[in-house]
Image: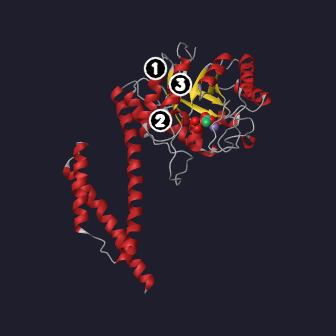
């Protein structure tokens, strides 16, 4: 019986999609020597656009059953409909996961939760593609309500309109951390493959997840990643998977000698990721300041508009109050931010003036 919390890190590895019996045999021969608690393999692939590889379907399930009989590694597939659940159960799949595109839809999730009712199959729920912790929590609750007791969340990152970061999907670490606060005891498995989207960035993401105390990792592994029919850029060879595990430092969330130290460390890491977000947001805000500068120059407006500054102080103080923040803190913080914004605007306005002259 699978227990996601039994061992840390709980390791899930396997290809993005099942492609052939030979692919599975090659993987089995390598992975049998490596730590893998669960073999992941997509049988039905949700593709953003038509025409891409959509999975092998039922035939792939037969190959997976052979794989398990031969190598003894339990298997997991993604399910998106009750029909998928029925087939996966029929072929003896050991665990199911709900994909990020399914978690966004409470109707679909409920249909799947109804389909597993009365079984004891372990279920992993990926975060929804949009950064909404309520949807994620709600999907997990639907499975809990169906009587599923072996549950875990998978953190696979979030889609964004802004593709400036290094990753395919933004990790938004604060969201799984908030899920953990709301659902203590629920194991969280990090999926660095779908967050990073690039082989060379996987280790950094996986290490961060371990540093945050997540319980496990789900990593895409393929015998020949460059030739993979889906997600070719992010899959690892079994050797690279092994190397990643060797480099990974598994830090404990608390120290034996002092529980307080562990707690302190945990809070610091949350603060680090929040601070990173604050800095990124300030960066974005300053980018807008420079566009404002251009516009104000064009419209012959002053950089500093007293009414606007007054409005900023009032609205931010009000919002601060709701978050138990001192009015003085808000005033000082926004004085700094606003001053810098004005400095950038005037610089932009004067630069354009120089260019135009
Ligand atoms: C996958 O795990 O291959 C997959 C399709 O993931 P996600 O639902 O996270 O996009
Ligand atoms: Mn994939």
User: Could you tell me if residue 335 is visible in this image?
Assistant: yes
Q: Secondary structure at mark 2?
A: helix
Kindly identify the residue that appears in the image at 22 percent across and 49 percent down: 318
Q: Earlier in the sequence, mark 1 or mark 3?
A: 3
C-alpha gap between disc 1 and disc 3: 14 Å
C-alpha gap between disc 2 and disc 3: 36 Å
Above or below, comparing residue 19 to residue 160 in the picture = above
Q: Quadrant of the C terminus?
A: bottom left
Report the mark closest to the observer, 1 or 3. 3
| Residue 61 in the image, given as x and y percentages of width and height | 71, 23
Kindly identify the residue that appears in the image at 38 percent across and 56 percent down: 282
Colouring scheme, one of rainbow, by chain, secondary structure, one colour? secondary structure
Q: Secondary structure at mark 1?
A: helix
Say which residue label 1 marks.
Answer: 144
Say which residue label 2 marks.
Answer: 211
The crowd level at tag 1 (other Cα within 10 Å; few <14, some 14-19, many 20+) is some
Q: Quadrant of ligand 1?
A: top right
Kindly identify the residue that appears in the image at 38 percent across and 25 percent down: 257
Q: Quadrant of the N terminus?
A: top right
Report the mark closest to the observer, 2 or 3. 3
User: Could you tell me if residue 38 is visible in this image?
Assistant: no
């Amino acid at each position: 019986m699978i227990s996601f919390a039994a061992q840390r890190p709980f390791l899930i590895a396997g290809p993005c999609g099942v492609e052939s019996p030979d692919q599975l045999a090659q993987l089995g021969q390598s992975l049998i020597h490596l730590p893998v608690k669960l073999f992941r393999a997509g049988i039905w692939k949700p593709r953003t656009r038509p025409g891409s590889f959509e999975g092998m379907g039922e035939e792939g399930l037969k190959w997976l059953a052979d794989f398990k009989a031969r190598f003894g590694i339990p298997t997991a597939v993604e399910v998106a409909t009750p029909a998928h659940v029925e087939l996966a159960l029929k072929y003896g799949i050991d665990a199911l996961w709900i994909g990020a595109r399914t978690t966004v839809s409470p109707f679909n999730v409920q249909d799947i939760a109804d389909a597993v009712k009365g079984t004891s199959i372990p279920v992993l729920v990926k975060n929804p593609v949009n950064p909404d912790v309520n949807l994620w929590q709600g999907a997990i609750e639907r499975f809990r309500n169906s009587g599923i007791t072996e549950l875990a969340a998978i953190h696979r990152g979030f889609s964004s309109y802004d593709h400036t970061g290094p990753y395919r999907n933004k990790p938004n670490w604060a969201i799984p951390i908030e899920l953990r606060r709301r659902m203590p005891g629920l194991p969280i498995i990090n999926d660095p493959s779908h967050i990073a989207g690039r082989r060379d960035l996987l280790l950094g993401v996986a290490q961060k997840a371990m540093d945050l105390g997540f319980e496990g990792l789900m990593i895409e592994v393929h015998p020949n990643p460059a030739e993979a029919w889906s997600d070719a850029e992010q899959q690892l060879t079994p050797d690279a998977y092994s190397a990643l595990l060797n480099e990974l430092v598994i830090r404990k969330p608390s120290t034996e000698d002092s529980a307080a130290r562990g707690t302190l460390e945990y809070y610091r890491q949350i603060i680090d990721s929040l601070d990173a977000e604050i800095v990124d947001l300030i960066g974005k805000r300053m980018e807008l300041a420079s566009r404002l500068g251009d516009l104000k120059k064009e419209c012959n407006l002053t950089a500093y508009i007293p009414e606007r500054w007054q409005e900023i102080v009032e609205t931010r103080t009000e919002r601060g109050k709701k978050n138990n923040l001192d009015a003085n803190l808000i005033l000082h913080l926004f004085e700094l931010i606003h001053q810098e914004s004005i400095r950038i605007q005037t610089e932009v306005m004067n630069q354009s003036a120089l260019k135009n002259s």
